[in-house]
Image (spheres, rainbow, N blue to C red):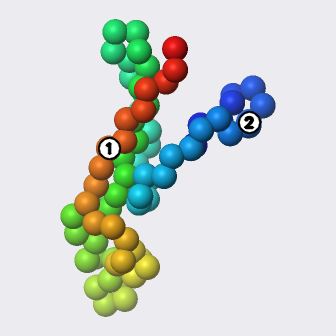
Amino acid sequence: MAFNANNGEPLWKHRVGSGIVGGPITYSVDGKQYVAVPSGFGGWVGWATIGEGGAPHLKDLPKGGSLHVFALPN
């Protein structure tokens, strides 16, 4: 989600299909600003379910990871 910094109102949202597993970053290329955020739990979440591991609720989440990059408006 993106929020208005002045009043906190939501400006935009996007579902990434899995959990956010890292912090977002922002960068610019030729004056255009982008925000990138990693999503997904990688290719193996077996640790979560071994012997009633720390997070058995993760076993049915989509596997794999992705990077979502969004361009900010000018």
The quadrant in which the N terminus is found is top right
Give how far across and how far down residue 2 sits, in percent.
59, 37
Q: Callout 2 environment at 10 Å: few (<14), some (14 to 19), or many (20+)? A: few
Looking at the image, which residue is at 43% across and 26% down? 71
CB-based contact (under 8 Å), mark 1 and mark 2: no
Q: Check the image and report above or below for 30 versus 47.
A: above
Q: What label sits on residue 8 in the rendered view?
A: 2
Q: What label sits on residue 9 in the rendered view?
A: none
Looking at the image, which residue is at 32% across and 44% down? 67
Residue 7's quadrant in the figure? top right
Q: Residue furthest right?
A: 7
State whether residue 47 appears in this view.
yes
Q: What label sits on residue 67 in the rendered view?
A: 1
Looking at the image, which residue is at 59% across and 38% down? 12
| Three-letter code, disc 2 | Gly
Please tell me which of labels 1 and 2 falls first in the chain. Answer: 2
Looking at the image, which residue is at 42% across and 32% down? 70
Q: Check the image and report above or below for 59 versus 28.
A: below
State the residue in front, 36 or 15: 15
State whether residue 54 appears in this view.
no
Mark 1 residue element = strand
